[in-house]
Amino acid sequence: MLIMTDSAVSAVRRFMDSTQAPIVGLRIKVEGGGCSGFQYGMKLESQAEDADEVFDFSGVKVLVDTTSAPLLNGVTVDFVDGLEGSGFKFHNPNASNSCGCGKSFSC
């Protein structure tokens, strides 16, 4: 199961509220690439796919495709805001290696 911190949920809600287009939720996926083999991707979606796994975090829907779901199991998504910048951070207990940017990993 995917975990979203309160800070991440609030950030997603702000992004969803600031867009003009109708948004059903946030897609989180894993794709090949990055400096460690896999990389995380995020995108606001106007509709869910039939096979998506849908998580609801206090009214914020997160969509995960069937290929990404096993790689996101147990992952915590956080949003940090600090002097050195702000952004989403992924904490993956299943990753055997991850890069310094926190956006890619290997299993």
Image: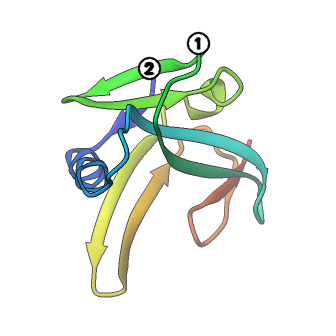
Give amino acid for label 2.
Val
Position of 6 compared to 91: left or right?
left
Vertical comparison of 80 with 26: above or below: below
Residue 51 image-quadrant placement? top right
**On the image, numbered disc 1 is attached to which residue?**
50
Residue 1's label in the rendered image is none
Residue neighbourhood size for the residue with mark 2, other residues' Cα within 10 Å, grouped as few (<14), some (14–19), many (≥20): some
Q: x and y percent of residue 57 in the render?
A: 26, 30
Q: Does dot 2 land on a helix, a strand or a loop?
A: strand
Position of 7 compared to 98: left or right?
left
Q: x and y percent of residue 55 in the render?
A: 38, 23
Give amino acid for label 1.
Asp
Front-most of residues 39 and 15 = 15
Where the C terminus falls, by quadrant?
Answer: top right
Front-most of residues 44 and 90 = 44
Tell me, what colour scheme is on the image? rainbow
Name the residue: 53% across, 40% down: 28
Where the N terminus falls, by quadrant?
Answer: top left
Q: How many marks?
A: 2
Mark 1 → mark 2, Cα distance in angstroms: 10 Å
Q: Does dot 1 land on a helix, a strand or a loop?
A: loop
Name the residue: 56% across, 63% down: 102
Position of 5 compared to 87: left or right?
left
Front-most of residues 3 and 18 = 18
**On the image, numbered disc 2 is attached to which residue?**
54
Name the residue: 51% across, 18% down: 53
Name the residue: 30% across, 24% down: 56
Q: Residue furthest top?
A: 50
Vertical comparison of 10 with 70: above or below: below
Residue neighbourhood size for the residue with mark 1, other residues' Cα within 10 Å, grouped as few (<14), some (14–19), many (≥20): few
Q: x and y percent of residue 37 in the render?
A: 80, 53
Residue 79 image-quadrant placement? bottom left
